[in-house]
Amino acid sequence: ANLKKRVQKLSVAELNELLEEIETAIKDYSEELVQQLALRDELEFEKEVKNSFISVLIEVQNKQREHKETVKKKKKLKNGSPQNGKQERGHMPGTYLTTVIPYEKKSGPPCVEDLQTLTKILYAMKEDSEKVPSLLTDYILKGEYAC
């Protein structure tokens, strides 16, 4: 009620000045809100990329462990029986699972672009995909880091 009386006593010029101040404040707050929402989206995306990287890394490590155990078991079985001189041809299961990805540690954590590239390579390794060599080559040729 007190504010209403103060506003009613203002002249048209004072009301216009107050309106301009309010519009400027709204514009400033809107710009700040848009910036904060953009930052939130960026951080959310970064979190998703990091979670994907961690998940696929754990999956690859588990598959590598399983593959290692399988190879050990096969070696134990082969030691007792002859191989008949035959060499298996084509893509051997687990061929790309044991790939080593070169990585040069920087002062901070890897950027989002690097994590996306590494995630793509790890996913291909997990799937034992024949894309691993080309993905790895592209990664190395671009200098190992996008940022």
Image (cartoon, grey):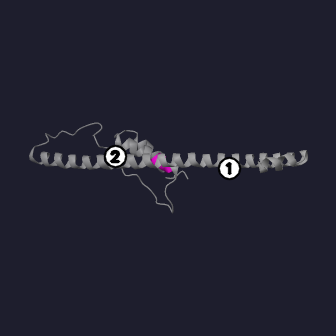
Q: Given the image, on which type of amino acid does mark 1 rest?
A: Glu
Q: How dense is the environment of label 1, judged by Cα within 10 Å: few (below 14), some, or many (20 and up)?
A: few
Question: Can the viewer see residue 79 in this picture?
Answer: yes
**Residue 11's spot in the image, x, y percent?**
90, 47
* Main SS class of the magenta portion in the image: helix
For the residue labelled by badge 1, is the local secondary structure a helix, a strand or a loop? helix
Q: Place residue 78 in its image quadrant.
A: top left
- Of badges 1 and 2, nearer the viewer stands 1
- What residue is at 61 percent from the left and 46 percent from the top? 38
Give the number of the disc on residue 59: 2
Q: Are marks 1 and 2 in contact (CB under 8 Å)?
A: no
Lower sequence index among marks 1 and 2: 1
Q: Secondary structure at mark 2?
A: helix
Say which residue label 1 marks: 32
Residue closest to the eye, 80 or 122: 122
Q: Which mark is residue 137?
A: none
Q: Along the horizontal axis of the image, is 22 left or right of 95? A: right
Total residue callouts: 2
User: Which residue type does callout 2 highlight?
Assistant: Glu
Percent of width and height locating residue 68: 24, 49
Residue at image location 36% in from the left, 44% down from the top:
125
The image quadrant that residue 128 belongs to is top left
Q: Which residues are magenta?
A: 114-118
